Image (cartoon, grey):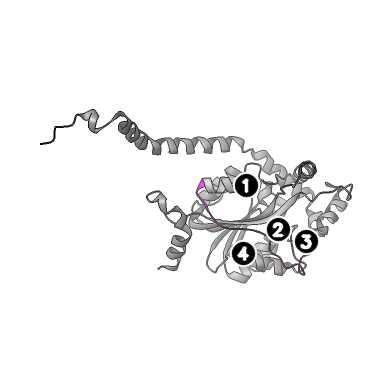
Amino acid sequence: MDEQRSFLETYTPRNIGWEIANRLRPIFTRLRSMLDARRRAARYDGRHAADVGSFYDVHHEAFMSVYGPVIQAMRTVDLEHLLDYQIERMGLTAGQVVLDAGCGVCAPAVHFARRVDVHIDAITASPTQAADARNRIHRAGLDDRVTVVDGDYHRLSDYYDEEHYDLIYFLESFGHSRAKPYLLDMCWRMLRPGGSLYIKDLFQRVAPDRRQAQRIAFEIRKINEAYHYDVANLNEILDVVRRRGFYLESLQSVDLDLDAFEGLAISNEFQELTGIAPIGDWDTYVFPVDFFELRCRKPAFDLSARPDRHFLQNQAAMQAESGS
């Protein structure tokens, strides 16, 4: 007959320590998440959104004169080609409820609603853009499918219901945020489980050497100061997105046909017209940004019960969506 084992023989101090740690880990994880959210909220300053809105109010006519109603630097000569490309890249499908974050005068939103039969809520920090957008929406006969407010996209829950959207997109508007982790938290709250986030924007170029890195940093400071921007670091954004719980569906450079590409001279026209951030010396100029498209998804289900299957979430999401 086996001798009866004592408590400390059965449950060693090491085992007891592991058990306590395992039971406390979810509590500490929640506390850390709450503290991280508070730190991100502390870095958010609503005055910057007001400054962005004022910038677009002041330069509205210049933007319309140079860019027209589609205010994107990376574009095609035929703007419908660009917007149709974005429909495909975003995965827009009929019946979706969509949020355009940083909508400008809503020319893309109007095009998308016409082409795909989606409902779009749009937000801009500029009252002048919002008024222009309402006129365009009304003339297009889309008052029931595209709505616009002038407000701060960091405060989306002040205007709209949470977990309401199938898709949130940023078309060269994400960079106007100087509190991107806070903004991405807000996007998470506004997306329904299974909803997608699409960002097409400028990101800091990675330099091959120190000299070019200094030139790039100089040019990015000019962009940020002149346009009330904050050109993002791609690696930092990927870390924030993945830490928040999104999973990455795709990341690529903007894949426009070379023959259709308009070129970036339009930005130079705007600089010459307004005097904003002119390029003084083309001989030493180093192009400071890359244009990327990032698409990620809020999981439709909770993977915490089987974290060993985290790498299968793409396939599981596709199965759930297809009903198989």
Q: Residues within 10 Å of mark 2 (few under 14, many from 20)?
A: many
| Visible residue check, residue 302 | no
The quarter in which the N terminus is drawn is top left
From the top left corner, tell me how far across and down residue 191 is, in percent. Answer: 51, 54
Label 4 or label 2, whichever lies nearer to me, is: 4
Residue designated by label 2: 105
Q: Nearer the viewer, mark 2 or mark 1?
A: 1
The Cα–Cα distance between marks 3 and 1, rounded to whole angstroms, is 32 Å
- Is disc 2 placed on a helix, strand or loop? loop
Distance between the alpha carbons at the discs numbered 2 and 3: 10 Å
Q: Residues within 10 Å of mark 3 (few under 14, many from 20)?
A: some
Bounds of the magenta segment:
244-262
Q: Categorize mark 1 by other alpha carbons within 10 Å: few (<14), some (14-19), many (20+).
A: few
Whether residue 27 can be seen here = yes
**Residue 68: mark in rendering:** 3
**Residue at label 4?**
89
Q: How far apart are the alpha carbons under marks 2 and 1?
A: 31 Å
Q: Residue furthest left?
A: 1
Q: Are marks 2 and 1 in contact (CB under 8 Å)?
A: no
